[in-house]
Amino acid sequence: MAQVSGNIDTRRGILDTAHGIVGAKGFSGVGLNEILVAAGVPKGSFYHYFGSKEAFGEALLADYFEAYLADIDATLAEPGLSHAERLMNYWRKWQATQGSIDYQRKCLAVKLAAEVSDLSEPMRLALKRGTAGIIDRVTGAIQAGVAEGSLKVEAEPRATAETLYHLWLGASLMAKIERTDAPFEAAMTTTRRILEPGPA
């Protein structure tokens, strides 16, 4: 149990605890009490920080994407590598984290997209904003790679970025169904064919 003491940000503690639980069980399948007990937080504190479970879900997604986008930014700015190498490292990290059964901070975009998009408009919009941020960063990486000469793409960079994100999102869903890495391996092969990564 992750106890949240008075001198630690209670809101932060609730969100941190919820990431693992919601990532494993989904949003609808988790009661607030389960999260609060795990976080060591009284129920009254929850409603001080979140007006409803839906508002909590929106905040959870915003928090998830903030950390995710910061991680992408770090990956795509890693020194000493070409833009192609950085972008391929991003897909490798996707496979390594989303393919792991034990990874507790799995992609909430994958986990919750189908579940909440028809149930909560605020959560759908949080998902839309977050995924748009990912596609924006992949687009920028492709543009930089093409300018550098380490990537070659036939379509426009943004269309390519959207295609690749959709490809990997689908691979993540199929990997959950099949419980193998085969969909990720297929996605990697297709990604290489689309990007044609090489030396700058």
Image: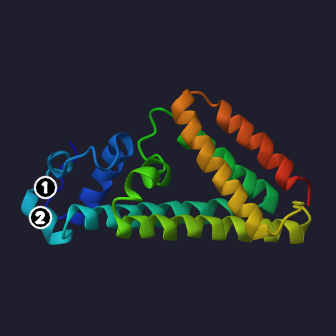
Q: In which quarter of the image is the N terminus?
A: top left
- Quadrant of residue 95 in the image? top right
- 15 displayed left or right of 87: left
Label of residue 101 in the image = none
Q: Residue at x 33, y 67 (%)?
A: 59
- 108 displayed left or right of 85: left
Expressed as whole percent of the image width and height from the top left, the position of residue 65 reads 47, 63
Label of residue 45 in the image = 2
- How far apart marks 1 and 2 lie (CA) works out to 7 Å
Q: Which amino acid, mark 2?
A: Ser
Q: Can residue 79 be seen in this view?
A: no
- 67 displayed left or right of 24: right
Q: Which amino acid, mark 1?
A: Val
Q: Is residue 146 visible?
A: yes
Label of residue 41 in the image = 1
Expressed as whole percent of the image width and height from the top left, the position of residue 125 reads 44, 70
